[in-house]
Amino acid sequence: VQLVESGGGLVQAGGSLRLSCAASGSIFSINTMGWYRQAPGKQRELVATITSGDSTNYVDSVKGRFTISRDNAKNTVYLKMNSLKTEDTAVYYCNAAVVAATDPWQQTYWGQGTQVTVSS
């Protein structure tokens, strides 16, 4: 199973970006999917999660600005980021709790990360 992110880049403060993360491989089902971020010199932090039933959770600092969604037919999770701030600058990672078709138990997989840089 692989997760591949896309959509990062450089944007001015106040701008928007949409990140995508597609899971591929021998997948039976995907449960919770999420986005995390890690800024230079800081620990990785949770940004948002979405369950298979579309229940969402956000860190307080992005509430009202970011929206997480998923397309189960495409095994893809999205993060729409509006009103970006310089403090949102980080490498963004997606993860997913996956039951592979070849294994009877759930495992967590991570993407390689995509850089988001917000300039002032």
Image (cartoon, helix red, strand yellow):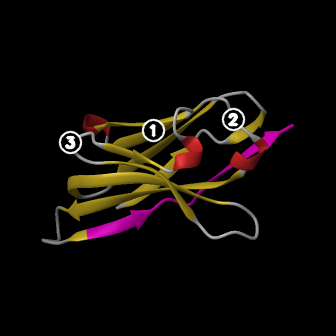
Residue at x 12%, y 71% (from the top left corner)? 104
Image quarter (top left, top right, bottom left or bottom right) of the N terminus: bottom left
The residue under label 2 is 84
Residue that extends furthest to the right in the rendered view of this protein: 120
- How far is disc 1 from disc 3 in space, using C-alphas? 15 Å
The residue under label 3 is 53
Element at label 2: loop
Q: Is residue 88 left or right of residue 113?
A: right
Which label's residue is closer to the chain start, 2 or 3? Answer: 3
Q: Is residue 31 left or right of residue 11?
A: left
- Decide which of 1, 11 is in the foreground and name it: 11
The image position of residue 55, as x and y in percent, is: 28, 42
Question: Measured along the vertical axis of the image, is residue 73 above or below residue 97?
Answer: above
**Mark 1 surroundings: few (<14), some (14-19) or many (≥20) residues within 10 A:** many
Element at label 1: strand
- Decide which of 19, 56 is in the foreground and name it: 56
Q: Which mark is residue 111?
A: none
Which label's residue is closer to the chain start, 1 or 3? Answer: 3
Task: State the extent of the magenta-drawn residues as a range.
Answer: 107-120
Residue that extends furthest to the left in the rendered view of this protein: 104
Image quarter (top left, top right, bottom left or bottom right) of the C terminus: top right
**Mark 2 surroundings: few (<14), some (14-19) or many (≥20) residues within 10 A:** many
Prevailing SS of the magenta stretch: strand
The residue under label 1 is 78
Residue at x 71%, y 40% (from the top left corner)? 9
- How far is disc 2 from disc 3 in space, using C-alphas? 27 Å
Question: Measured along the vertical axis of the image, is residue 101 above or below residue 61?
Answer: below
Amino acid type indicated by mark 3: Gly
Element at label 3: loop
